Image (tube, rainbow, N blue to C red):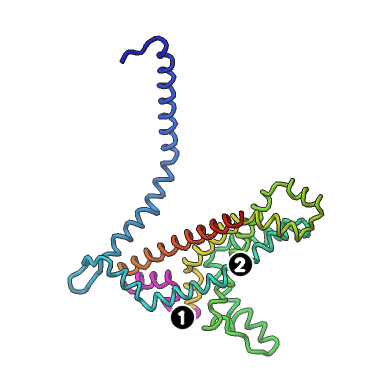
Amino acid sequence: MAIDAVQRPQYARSVRRARVRRRLSVTAWLMLAPFITVFVVSVIAPLLYALAISVYQNRIVGGTVFVGLENYLRALTDPLLGEGVIRVLLFIAVQVPIMLSISLTAALALDSGRMAGSRTVRLGLFLPYAVPSVVAALMWGYIFGGQFGLVGQIWGAVGAAPPDLLGNALMLPSIGNIVTWSMVGYNMLIFYAALRAVPTEIYEASAIDGAGEWRRAWSIKLPALRPAMLLALVFSIIGSLQLFNEPSILQALRPSVITTNYTPNLYAYSLSFLGGQINYAAAIAILMGLVTVIAAVFVQVVSARARRQTR
């Protein structure tokens, strides 16, 4: 189709725009290429490999055979896996609210501007997050020791029998203490950053209206923190479902208390590296990944519905 003199400049501009868009698209993909490469190699490829081996079984007679969903059906009816899942759900129900409440209280106290040495307190609360979880578990394992640890020495100094913090009854609270100690500062920083993003004009208007610190915290700060609290809640649930480092370290101190199925991740690790059941362990890992995704989506949907109802 011929282009007349009036249409020619417009056609030239559209061609130049198309070239610029194509050049920008190529540049964007080149900049994303390193991330995409690492993501595919470290996330997508292991996930596909786990999915592939989870539908096989390695049998003494017959070797590796395709079994379809048999490993998944076995996992859904496995009482050992069920015990670990229930234990982790109990851990989430108790530890996560306590940890987020402490983090929220610390963030509100720091943001109020009435705390002396707030920078030192902020750094002190965040410092445990910099300690690797393995080191933290070793340190607290020593502290909790009734015969050789700090708790045993303190109770021994007063002539009393120390509580068995690594026993059956108190092992899960002790693990919760380690996780809370490590993660309070991290969540506190999320809340504190969200509070610092609140426009100062709102605080000035509330001060003119005579609102005190408690009133500002309840009516301004807590509503502003809802997205940050949702983020911290999702991260905490995901981290709790993946509980592994602390029980695996404390297992060396109390193998009779922390069994190989104490948490789902520890169970999958034991099946894979100690029991040689790689295919079944892969099926458990895939199921726990699905549970984690469902839990995260459920929390977000419930939170979004609550926000719509309050508007």
Three-letter amino acid code at disc 1?
A: Pro
Magenta residues, start to end: 253-277
Q: How many numbered tags mark residues here? A: 2
Q: Is residue 64 left or right of residue 162?
A: left
SS for tag 1?
A: loop
Q: Find residue 298 and name its label.
A: none
Location of residue 36 with respect to 288 vertically, above or below? above
Which of the 4 image quarters holds residue 54?
bottom left
Residue 102 vs residue 290: left or right? right
At a point 30% along the width and 69% down the height, the residue shown is 71
Which residue is nearer to you in this view: 42 or 241?
241
- The local crowd at label 2, few if under 14, some if 14 to 19, many if 20 or more residues have their Cα within 10 Å, is many
Which residue: 79% across, 58% down? 212
Question: Which is more toward the observer, 247 or 21?
Answer: 21
Which of labels 1 and 2 is toward the front?
2
Task: State the SS at label 2.
Answer: helix
Which residue is tagged 1? 255
Residue 249 point in image, percent of width and height: 49, 72
The N terminus is located in which quarter? top left
Residue 189: image quadrant is bottom right
Q: Amino acid at mark 2?
A: Met
Residue wearing tag 2: 99
> If you read the primary sequence from the N terminus, does the residue marked by circle 1 or circle 2 appear first?
2
Q: Is residue 16 above or below residue 277?
A: above
Q: Are marks 1 and 2 in contact (CB under 8 Å)?
A: no
The image quarter in which residue 308 lies:
bottom right
Residue 296 percent location from the top left of the image: 48, 60
> How many residues crowd around disc 1 within 10 Å: few (fewer than 14), some, or many (20 or more)?
few
Query: Which residue is at a point 63% across and 89% down the rendered structure image?
Result: 161
Is residue 182 in view from this perspective?
A: yes
Whether residue 54 sits left or right of residue 29 in the image: it is left
Residue 30, image x and y in percent?
Answer: 42, 37
